[in-house]
RNA sequence: GCCCGGGUGGUGGAAUGGUAGACACGAAGGACUUAAAAUCCUUUGGCCAAUGCGGCCGUGCGGGUUCAAAUCCCGCUCCGGGUACCA
């Protein structure tokens, strides 16, 4: 903190950029008030021309990577809720830059997506055209907000230069398998060598179906057979899969794209259907995806969502022989201890053995049931959860622990996609099995008793006993053991006798990676004699072809089947499916590190420097989609030596949604008369949404209302206090509710800096919160007040080189510290308050000292970059404020002689007291107890205890 | 059902076991102005008291830990979100 010239020097500088003022000067005002429009425009141009936010690798500085989830550019443009996260990340990026980090802060577009394709189907407009137009609009709106993105690094998922690497990664997945023994992906070529030498031998691989063959058997297979086998192991594989088929969209959806049996986009019904589909073997990474959650700084709730989605459960696989057949039935159970209580078995209707084991007398009913169950849509299944249905197959399983013969049923409460699609039913200790047993009059056996309780008659039970606590009974060699001991003992026995083994099961399923759509990445795959083969990497990118229509063909093939010459040079047909939306977004954060590289995904140098994202901002709706796939993608790229960090997103926050605040009018039924809010209960009224733009502070602009819609031109009103008061409610922001706020209007009225400040001021970044336009006025006042600190009454720039007073230094450094503390814990709303307090206090002192105001401009710059930049240049700097340094906090300025103590008696605050900061506890105690005020609260009694927290509080216990 | 969040003035929110309601919005009153806008000043959790003294109550409800609890613990309640025949 250097000394300034002691001579008071009052600087009056004419506005250096005042040339283009347009009608802002009034007769009185000579200089200019806070002219945000001109300021913002000027600096946005300057930053763009000078590439102020361009960033390159700089080994002399530590890196910091700040990322927003890139948007899908929809036709509707941005509303006030979208920029919330972008503003937050921009503040962090700017702050970290001031702190000396080399900050990577890119932006791009998730440009493949359904809406552009739907629009293409309706209008014939190429999705690329629609997408380009929407991107332009997004870009324009974002530019007006003053973000510090390095736009030279922009990526678009639909750009062949970008999706070349999406296709490339797919090829690597295709050429890899997952070795559970080494816990990583390895080349399929090595797997082939292994098969040639030792067959499946001691192979421990992630696969679709466990297979066993010898080297000789492998060598005896022809090429097609071998390729078929390899497909069982590839990380990107083609398989017959039960998929979520959406007839309305003509495509398959991933599990996370389906909600309650309807498509998430569009809300169309979804059916289950068996189709040949590309899938990614995400399940191979289940444990690593789970473990990795311990190493990231994410909201606990989001981690929990992912843990549930991965759904690890520990238990055992148990083999049941089927009476009269060679086959054995494998079931998964988390409760092997209850094996003695299994009284029947249930298979999913789709289970492969159903046809084989069903007896002749049962076959008609079973077939009917299977047909009925498989044709039921997902939606019906969910709607009828409580209906119990099933059929007996006529076959019996043999319980390995006691040889008991138990009936095998089929029922749709057993899901084909989970575990092995078959269960042992223990009605005594599983509520679903219990309900099923009661419904079909199957026996129930108790095998667990609560600690200290005697067994009871299960026929009397109202519900099963599911808890994992108690002692085993009626259970052979595990009698008397606790549940936990029983589980261990049973697993040991199963393993020793070849009847099963301890097993960990995961709920997470492989990701279906095919879409029957046009607007997506083509697969770099062709078919030779029906066998899928990878394109050579030199052929990439395989560009999306032109088609004459965006609909499926008459034969039901995807739109790409319409493309002319959709085949390789040799004439082999190319794959006609395209990749799903999450393909392009799974690795975009890596490409930003080196977006112009035409030789590789990203260079070793780039990944070695930027490593991973330090701070990621986006919505929590991506918990089971993008954030799982991206983590999978990154881990795979780690395995093959490209990525260098196991977790791509170190710290993540979910920005809350901004809700709309709707206004209502109350129309008397059957009339054109509207009743003010508080009088509405005296009439029979209908509530109607009213455009929030014609309501100010819940008071309706009656004339504007009459003009709003022709219907209301002759409306009558019943007023209160001469005003029409509207009702209000917090709802989703939507056009139909007439409550949409768009950022362009607000920027026009208040400027981007004010909007940025206000969005942060609304509340904690992760909260969902209502948008209330009224509050923005307060922030706008703050900006004007701040501007005035640097200007005299005629709005001439005027700062003094005089040395600041102790009080002024103190205000500044208190602010420096608080702002910094708050930014570091991402409490961005309280920073705004702190800045307001600072400006209020400096205004009270009429402070215009350069030494204070320069630092203030820097502190302000992450939040209000345009205004700060203007002030910075007015202060005489020629370089952007972006290259300034965050002022170091100096504790000296906060040093005080006196501290204010809160004095309480029995915990109740009674008065405050200023005392020297260095006074000892003994001294304080003496003074406080000697005060006349204290006598009143001591009531003549002697204090039992006196607690003194230095410089804070004194508590006297009486 | 299960799993997460969360209940603080008229409103958004602040308070990292230590003066509850910072900072704003809104409201009421006032100054300036022919007027409006802009700006500035005062009051603003409730109740009692009334001279600006002062007191009592108060962070969804009931207990507890502590010198001290919005904050930690136990039980309940209400609201929001996620998820669900997952064996």
Image (tube, helix red, strand yellow):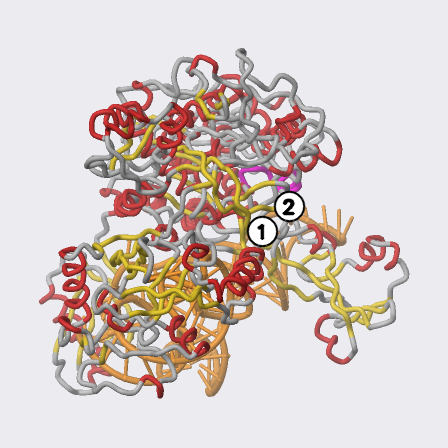
Residue A522, image x and y in percent? 53, 26
Magenta-tinted stretch: A743-754
Badge 2: chain ID? A
* Residue A773 higher or lower than A158, as above or below: below
Residue shown at 37%/33% (left/top)?
A235
Q: Residue furthest left?
A: A922
- Residue A753 falls within the magenta-colored stretch: yes
Q: Could you tell me how many numbered marks the image carries?
A: 2
- Residue A714 falls within the magenta-colored stretch: no
Alpha carbon of mark 2 to alpha carbon of mark 1: how far?
A: 8 Å
Q: Main secondary structure of the magenta part?
A: helix
Packing grade of label 2 (10 A; few <14, some 14-19, many >=20) is few
Residue shown at 58%/32% (left/top)?
A144
* Residue A33 higher or lower than A386, as above or below: above
Residue wearing tag 1 = A271
Residue A511, image x and y in percent? 44, 41
Residue A895, image x and y in percent? 23, 48
Residues marked 2 and 1 touching at CB (< 8 Å): yes
Badge 1: chain ID? A
A133 or B9: which is nearer to us? A133
Pick the quarter of the image with the C terminus of chain A: bottom left
């Amino acid at each position: 903190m250097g000394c300034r010239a002691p001579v008071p020097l009052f600087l009056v500088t004419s506005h250096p950029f005042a040339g283009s003022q347009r009608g802002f000067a009034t007769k009185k005002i000579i200089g200019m008030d806070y002219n945000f429009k001109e300021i913002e425009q000027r600096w946005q141009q300057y930053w763009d021309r000078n590439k102020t936010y361009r960033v390159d690798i700089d080994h002399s500085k530590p890196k910091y990577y700040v990322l927003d989830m890139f948007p899908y550019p929809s036709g509707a443009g941005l509303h006030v809720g979208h920029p919330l996260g972008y503003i937050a990340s921009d503040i962090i990026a700017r702050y970290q830059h001031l702190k000396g980090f080399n900050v990577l802060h890119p932006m791009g577009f998730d440009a493949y997506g359904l809406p552009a394709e739907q629009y293409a189907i309706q209008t014939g407009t190429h999705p690329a055209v629609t997408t380009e137009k929407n991107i332009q609009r997004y870009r324009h709106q974002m530019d007006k907000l003053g973000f510090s993105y390095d736009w030279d690094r922009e990526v678009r998922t639909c750009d062949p230069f970008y999706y070349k690497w999406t296709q490339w990664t797919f090829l690597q997945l295709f050429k890899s398998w997952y070795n559970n023994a080494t816990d990583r992906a390895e080349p399929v070529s090595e797997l082939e060598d292994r098969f040639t030498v030792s067959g499946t031998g001691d192979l421990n691989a992630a696969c679709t179906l466990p297979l066993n063959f010898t080297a000789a058997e492998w060598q005896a297979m022809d090429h097609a057979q071998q390729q078929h086998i390899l497909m069982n192991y590839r990380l990107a594989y083609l398989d017959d899969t039960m998929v979520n088929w959406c007839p309305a969209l003509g495509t398959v959806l991933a599990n996370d794209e389906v909600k309650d049996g309807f498509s998430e986009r569009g809300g169309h019904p979804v059916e289950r259907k068996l189709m040949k589909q590309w899938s990614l073997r995400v399940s191979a990474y289940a444990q690593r995806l789970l473990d990795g959650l311990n190493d990231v700084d994410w909201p606990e709730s989001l981690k929990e969502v992912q843990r549930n989605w991965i759904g690890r459960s520990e238990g055992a696989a148990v083999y049941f022989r089927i009476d009269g057949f060679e086959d054995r039935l494998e079931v998964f159970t988390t409760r092997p201890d209850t094996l003695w209580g299994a009284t029947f078995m249930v298979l999913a209707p789709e289970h492969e053995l159903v046809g084989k084991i069903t007896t002749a007398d049962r076959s008609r009913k079973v077939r009917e049931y299977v047909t009925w169950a498989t044709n039921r849509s997902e939606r019906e299944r969910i709607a009828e959860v409580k209906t119990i249905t099933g059929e007996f197959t006529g076959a019996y399983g043999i319980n390995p622990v006691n040889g008991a013969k138990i009936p095998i049923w089929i029922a749709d409460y057993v899901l084909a996609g989970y575990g092995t699609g078959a269960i042992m039913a223990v009605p005594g200790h599983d509520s679903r099995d219990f309900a099923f047993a009661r419904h079909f009059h199957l026996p129930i056996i108790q095998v667990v008793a609560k600690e200290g309780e005697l067994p009871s008659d299960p026929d009397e039970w109202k519900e099963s006993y599911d808890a994992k606590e108690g002692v085993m009974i009626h259970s052979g060699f595990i009698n008397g053991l606790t549940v936990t001991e029983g589980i261990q003992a049973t697993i040991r026995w199963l393993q020793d006798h070849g009847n099963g083994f301890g097993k960990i099961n995961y709920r997470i399923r492989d990701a279906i990676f095919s879409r029957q759509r046009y607007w997506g990445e083509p697969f770099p795959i062709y078919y030779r004699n029906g066998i899928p083969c990878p394109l050579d990497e030199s052929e990439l990118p395989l560009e999306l072809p032109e088609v004459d229509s965006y609909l499926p063909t008459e034969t039901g093939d995807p739109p790409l089947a319409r493309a002319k010459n959709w085949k390789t040079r040799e004439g082999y047909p190319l794959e006609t499916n395209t990749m799903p939306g999450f393909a392009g977004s799974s690795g975009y954060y890596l490409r930003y590190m080196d977006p112009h590289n035409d030789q590789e995904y990203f260079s070793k140098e780039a990944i070695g420097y930027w490593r991973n994202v330090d701070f990621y901002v986006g919505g929590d709706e991506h918990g089971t989609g993008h954030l799982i796939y991206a983590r999978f993608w990154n881990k795979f790229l780690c395995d093959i030596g490209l990525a260098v960090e196991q977790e791509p997103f170190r710290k993540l926050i979910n920005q809350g949604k901004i809700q709309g605040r709707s206004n209502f009018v109350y129309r008397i039924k059957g009339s054109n008369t509207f009743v003010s809010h508080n009088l509405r209960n005296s009439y029979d009224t209908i509530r109607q949404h009213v455009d929030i733009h014609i309501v100010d502070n819940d008071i309706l602009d009656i004339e504007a209302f009459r003009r709003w819609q022709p219907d209301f031109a002759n409306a009558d009103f019943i007023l209160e206090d001469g005003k029409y008061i509207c009702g209000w409610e917090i709802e989703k922001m939507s056009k139909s509710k007439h409550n949409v706020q768009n950022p362009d209007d607000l920027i026009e009225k208040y400027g981007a800096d004010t909007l940025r400040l206000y969005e942060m001021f609304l509340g904690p970044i992760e909260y969902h919160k209502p948008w209330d336009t009224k509050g923005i006025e307060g922030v706008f006042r703050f900006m004007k007040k701040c501007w005035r600190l640097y200007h005299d009454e005629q709005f001439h720039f005027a700062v003094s080189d005089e040395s600041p007073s102790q009080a002024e230094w103190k205000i500044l450094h208190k602010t420096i510290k608080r702002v910094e503390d708050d930014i570091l814990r991402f409490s961005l709303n309280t920073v705004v308050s702190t800045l307001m307090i600072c400006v209020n206090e400096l205004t009270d002192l009429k402070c215009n000292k350069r030494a204070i105001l320069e630092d203030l401009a820097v502190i302000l710059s992450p939040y209000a970059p345009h205004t700060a930049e203007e002030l910075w240049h007015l202060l005489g700097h020629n370089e952007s404020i972006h290259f300034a340094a965050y002022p170091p906090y100096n504790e000296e300025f906060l040093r005080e002689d006196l501290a204010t103590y809160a004095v309480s008696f029995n915990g109740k605050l009674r008065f405050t007291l200023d005392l020297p900061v260095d006074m000892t506890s003994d001294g304080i105690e003496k003074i406080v107890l000697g005060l006349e005020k204290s006598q009143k609260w001591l009531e003549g009694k002697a204090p039992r205890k006196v607690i003194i927290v230095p410089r804070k509080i004194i508590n006297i216990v009486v």
